[in-house]
Amino acid sequence: MKQRGFSLIMAIFLIVVLGGIAVFIGRVSTMQHQSSALDEEGAMAYQAARAGIEWGVYQAIVGSSCVGSTSFTLPLIVPATPTTSESAVNYTVTVTCALTTATEGSTGINVYQITATAINASVGRFFVERRITATVTQ
């Protein structure tokens, strides 16, 4: 009995298996790149929210005033990396402040609760939001 064609079946099987492995590796690589980009966006959003907190604390301590609710856009200047370009990194930061007064003995104390929320404002990028709250007394 002749066994003709067995090599062809084996070759097709190997091509299909190797192609499947290549597709799997490509998908895993793509997911890792997206995860890395999302992690970078989250870190930049956190820093933008932190800048908003520092601005609100400055207004409360130096100006002795609660800013209420203020929004501004922070263009973060970062070196260009494979996942971001310098011109595409903008975050809208909303800073809110709530003032509570308390009396301790005969001394009046102002308690400022400041919340900063940073949202990436770029179109076509991952949506990332970070919120930080700080309480400051004076």
Image (cartoon, helix red, strand yellow):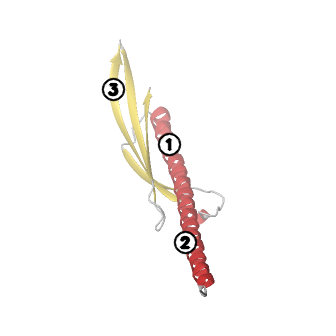
Dot 2: few (<14), some (14–19), or many (≥20) neighbours within 10 Å?
few
The amino acid type found where label 2 is placed reads Gly
> Residue reaching furthest top?
105
Residue 28 disc label: none
Dot 3: few (<14), some (14–19), or many (≥20) neighbours within 10 Å?
few
Could you tell me which quadrant the N terminus lies in? bottom right
The amino acid type found where label 3 is placed reads Thr
- The residue where tag 3 is placed is 101
Of residues 57 and 120, the one nearer the viewer is 120
Please tell me in which quadrant of the rendered image residue 40 appears: bottom right
Marks 3 and 1 close (CB-CB < 8 Å): no
- The residue where tag 2 is placed is 20
Instruction: Tell which tag, 3 or 2, sits nearer the viewer.
Output: 2
Numbered disc 2: secondary structure: helix
- The residue where tag 1 is placed is 55
Residue under the point 52% across and 45% down: 51
Question: Disc 3 to disc 2, how far (Cα)?
Answer: 66 Å
Question: Disc 3 to disc 1, how far (Cα)?
Answer: 21 Å
Residue under the point 40% across and 42% down: 67
Q: Is residue 112 left or right of residue 29?
A: left
Instruction: Tell which tag, 1 or 2, sits nearer the viewer.
Output: 2
Question: Disc 1 to disc 2, how far (Cα)?
Answer: 53 Å
x%, y% of residue 104?
A: 36, 15
x%, y% of residue 4?
A: 61, 87
The amino acid type found where label 1 is placed reads Trp
Dot 1: few (<14), some (14–19), or many (≥20) neighbours within 10 Å?
some
Of residues 60 and 81, the one nearer the viewer is 81
x%, y% of residue 93?
A: 45, 51
Residue under the point 33% across and 22% down: 102
